Image: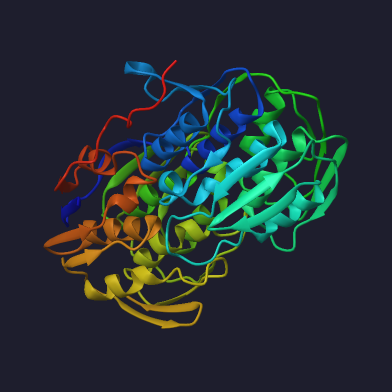
Amino acid sequence: MDKLVIRGGNPLLGTIRVSGAKNAALPAMAAALLTEEPVILENIPQVRDIITERNLLAAMGAEVELGYGRAQHRTTLCCRHLVNPEASYELVKTMRASTLVLGPLVARTGEARVSLPGGCAIGARPIDLHIKGLEKLGAEITQEHGYIKAQAKRLKGAHIVFEKITVTGTEDLLMAATLADGDTVMENCAREPEVTDLANLLVKMGARIDGIGTSTLKIHGVEKLHGAKHRIIPDRIEAGTFIIAGALTGGDLMIQGCDPSHLGALLSKLEENGVKLRVNSDTVRVMGDSQLKPSDITTEEYPGFPTDMQAQYMTLATQCEGTSVVVENIFENRFMHAQELVRMGANIKIEGRRAIVRGRTPLSGAAVQASDLRASASLVIAALVAEGETIIDRVYHIDRGYEHIEEKLRNVGAEIKRIGELFPRKASPVAVS
């Protein structure tokens, strides 16, 4: 099993280019199930979850063509012949986004059999909102042996009000509604940039959607969708992770190819902390030569402070001069990184959904273990500022969502290496057209 070995203390100097957003690429790939024609996706990140999704679509009968050389971040998907509308447990047990194929499959083929999702152990991501929405659209749902089975001759437009905001639920039902008979109105929808990116792709494919970017979406169902070409948005969480790394290491780091408009809550909070930032249309420059002030955060749905940046921010809070309070409102089990940070010297006390972080505490290298994707990123940041050597185990979590993170950091001065069985740089075998 791979480990990352990091020796802290080096300032990060130079430029890091942000990859495409994993959480936008996954629903975009699922959207290819809605049409017989090719869907060309650019700026696809090379991470484990993408490989899993490619293999999943190939197992259903999709033709998957991977780009090479300069086009290595492009994937062409053609779902002309879907011979097996199933997402098996073996294929999706490591990925939370498996439910994203449920709506498109039943809308396109009239049936779907999807394993309940796996992924990070950060708390419940209830699928009941997907199920209730599909039932309102006319699907018959049964659940047995860890699988959800959905059937419908053709989905019918409906009025759906989400009991709570759900990103994957919004995306799943949005895709399903594009091929439903009649109009669908969805209220209390997620407004994350990844949802907007999916809606923009669907419009390119011929979908009729009103209210994109708002909490109320109106979808006018169409008979069929066609192929399209689409560039995935930059990964705002990867960008935020590197911004915090730059703020803590005393360097001068340029984060290039990002969309600062997607980072509003984070950038505003970092300015409260005293971080020096210069923001342009697609770059953020962070200068880590200032004393950091404490500030509290509460995770919220977009445009609030993202839960996927909570762990990284907690690492930053350990280096602020004073006490910060971190409140996690999205997932009930997302403080597992805190104990690992304590092993490195942090002063953190957990009280339910609140973490009280007292800084500034010097961090020292230690053997630590990643518990989930974003927790692993927080430990990498901590290791960059710790004295001595840190060994991070179970880094397969970070490979799910960060493209070649050790190479990007090494190129700007970090002393970081990977040991163990190397993560394969090429995708696992899939059906290639």
Residue 250 in view here: yes
**Residue 278 point in image, percent of width and height:** 44, 44
Q: Quadrant of residue 211?
A: top right
Question: Relative to 124, does residue 117 appear above or below in the rendering?
Answer: above
Residue in the image at 68% along x and 32% along y: 109
Front residue of this view, candidates 245 and 306:
306
Residue 194 in view here: no
Q: Quadrant of residue 310?
A: bottom left
Asked if residue 190 lies left or right of residue 242, the reply is: right
Question: Relative to 279, does residue 37 appear above or below in the rendering?
Answer: above
Asked if residue 381 lies left or right of residue 258, the reply is: left
Front residue of this view, candidates 238 and 255:
238
**Residue 240 point in image, percent of width and height:** 43, 50
Q: How is the image coloured?
A: rainbow
Asked if residue 124 lies left or right of residue 188, the reply is: left
Residue found farthest to the front: 145
Q: Quadrant of residue 344?
A: bottom left
> Quarter holding the C terminus?
top left
Residue in the image at 17% along x and 69% along y: 364
Asked if residue 263 lies left or right of residue 371, the reply is: right
Residue in the image at 27% along x and 53% along y: 395
Question: Relative to 214, does residue 266 appear above or below in the rendering?
Answer: below
**Residue 90 point in image, percent of width and height:** 41, 47
**Number of marks:** 0
**Residue 163 point in image, percent of width and height:** 74, 63
Residue found farthest to the left: 388
Front residue of this view, candidates 394 and 304:
394
